[in-house]
Amino acid sequence: MCTLCDRPLGARVEWHHAVPKSEGGRETVPLHPICHRTVHAALTNSELAALCSDGALDAVRGHPEVARFLRWVADKPRDFHAPTRRSRTRDEGWAWRKR
């Protein structure tokens, strides 16, 4: 089962560091590729580290963009794929960091 969306895993599985390696994380959890991309599109590594300090993705599921994605993907097939866009709020954060 995918740790983020709780749907059965398909042919492709990606292993996600709940706490990013850059933030000291070691434990990984299985995700669908689309779920993995959504997590990283919506949240920065420092935000992930703050939300997943206990290694669980419960707080990530509560993030508004991720929650909207989870409602949308719930009835999709296990190997469903679609392009993933980076969050506007995250893009603004990146623009701010580049200055």
Image (spheres, rainbow, N blue to C red):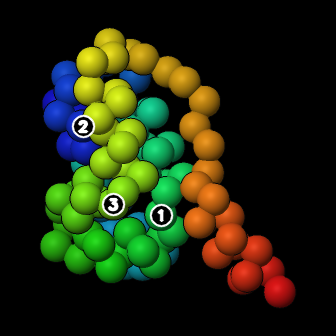
Q: Is residue 53 above or below residue 37?
A: below
| Helix, strand or loop for disc 2 | loop
**Mark 2 or 3, closer to the camera:** 3
Which numbered disc covers residue 43?
1
Q: 9 left or right of 36? A: left
* Residue shown at 59% from the left, 66% from the top: 89
Report whether residue 56 is seen: yes
For the residue marked with disc 3, what is the amino acid? His
* Residue shown at 17% from the left, 34% from the top: 6
Q: Position of residue 83 (x, y in %)?
A: 60, 30
Pointer 1 and pointer 3: residues touching (CB < 8 Å)? Answer: yes
| Helix, strand or loop for disc 1 | loop
The image quadrant of residue 96 is bottom right
Q: Earlier in the sequence, mark 1 or mark 3?
A: 1
Report whether residue 21 is seen: no
For the residue marked with disc 1, what is the amino acid? Leu
Residue placed under numbered mark 3 in the picture:
63
**Mark 1 or 3, closer to the camera:** 3
Q: Is residue 68 above or below residue 72?
A: below
Q: Is residue 73 above or below residue 84?
A: above
How far apart, in angstroms, are the residues tagged by discs 1 and 3? Answer: 9 Å
Count every numbered label the image shows and give the total. Answer: 3
For the residue marked with disc 2, what is the amino acid? Cys
Furthest residue toward bottom: 99
